[in-house]
Amino acid sequence: MGIHSTETPRQGEERPMEGIRVLDISTVLAGPHCATLFAEFGAEVIKIELPGEGDTLRRLGKQVGGKSLFWRVEARNKKTITCDLRKPEGKDLLLRLVKISDVLVENFRPGTLERWDIGWNVLHEVNPGLILARVSAYGQTGPNSGKPGFGRIAQAFGGLTYLAGYPDRAPVTPGTASIADYTSGMYACIGTLMALRYRDKTGQGQYIDVGLYESIFRILEDAAVRYDQTGSVTERLGTGTLNSVPHGHFQCKDGDWIAIACTNDTMWQRLCRAMDNKALPSDPRYSTAARRVENREEVNDIVQRFCLSFDAKELTRLLDEHEVPNGPIYSVEGIFADEHYKARGDIIAVEDPELGPVRMPAVVPRLSLTPGYVEWPGRDLGADNEQVYRDLLDLTEAEIRELREKAVI
């Protein structure tokens, strides 16, 4: 069985999050991504959604068979139940689940759980060992805490959007509008793992507070300390980067693009050998990293003219021979055709009851002894109601039926 098998783990094979129960009441992406990471490594993750409506993610993106492909990948390995947390009966069901769970993930606007009388103080009283992972646009405190927000807003507020694009044009979307959601989900997962470690030693639960914009601000390299110490503001550089040249995107003869990254003098010298230009390494305008940054446009022009002499695959082979860091600029079509992706098993096929095999990204990271698995794609709304309410909360069929009739579940 490969490290990224979609099958059920071998009998007796322990999974790192096995025995951990996570309640996911979050919506769309940042909180759900945190919970999905737990699900991929063996935690029992129970996705709790509003009856009749469900997570907005079910309606986002391309629909096939009347159902979202986005949902199928981002809700994988989760059990799905319905519960209206705004109703007294729904609140009671949640608190009964909280009592027997380890983690609760939410990403509502701050104050929402408190208005429903299921805020941190209530949850902590019900289960002192509970870890509450809270992801919101601006965090639980501060003057902006009550404002709504999404990944695009966080990427703007966090400083990333300002850096995306060319200096003489409007800032552009840095890749996708969901980068902040994924980074915040990962930070929330890391924080929850740390809190679980602390709870293992002390028995004490705590809450995690992640603002979407904070995960973006944290990955802006040295922009903050550079401004603090020198007063300089990092600006948009198009395809380049601030500290190294050539370090950008270059078009090839066949119209394809390639990324080249020379972060030090040694790599620059290798590139010069690949270009068969013996004079460049000793030219005082280009001999050091600092001088190349000063003469950025000239250096990039030299490299661009060289790249236009080759098709992308020819250029990749030449640069590889000289150990120059490079890579094709792929669309998802290129990714699906790439031999390295295939060899690593980075794309897995997950069996969907309606669509058959659905190919999607494999589990990250890879663990050598306790790998993650994808056992099923995102399920239909309320698919696990009976199993969860009957087996975990000991509700009778009559009680479940009554809750359904009242639209509680």
Image (cartoon, grey):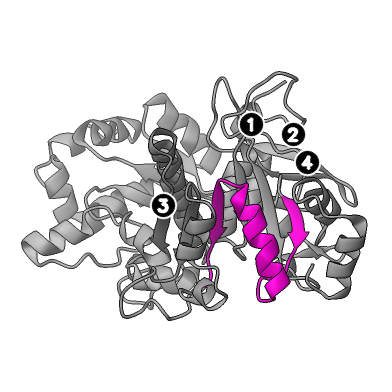
Which residue matches tag 2? Answer: 6
Badge 4 or badge 1: first in the primary sequence:
1
Which-is-in-front pick, marks 3 and 2? Answer: 3
Marks 3/4: CA–CA distance:
35 Å
Marks 3/2: CA–CA distance:
33 Å
Which residue matches tag 1? Answer: 339
Q: Position of residue 1 (x, y in %)?
A: 72, 20
Q: Which mark is residue 350?
A: 4
Sort mark 1 into few (<14), some (14-19) or many (20+) by Cα contacts within 10 Å.
Answer: few
> SS at mark 3?
loop
Q: Position of residue 152 (x, y in %)?
A: 47, 71
Left or right position of 391 against 285: right
Q: How many marks?
A: 4
Q: Are marks 2 and 1 in contact (CB under 8 Å)?
A: no
Which contiguous range is marked in magenta? 79-108
Does residue 163 sit above or below 348 in this rendering? below
Badge 3 or badge 4: first in the primary sequence:
3
Q: Is residue 86 magenta?
A: yes
Mark 3 belongs to which amino acid? Gln
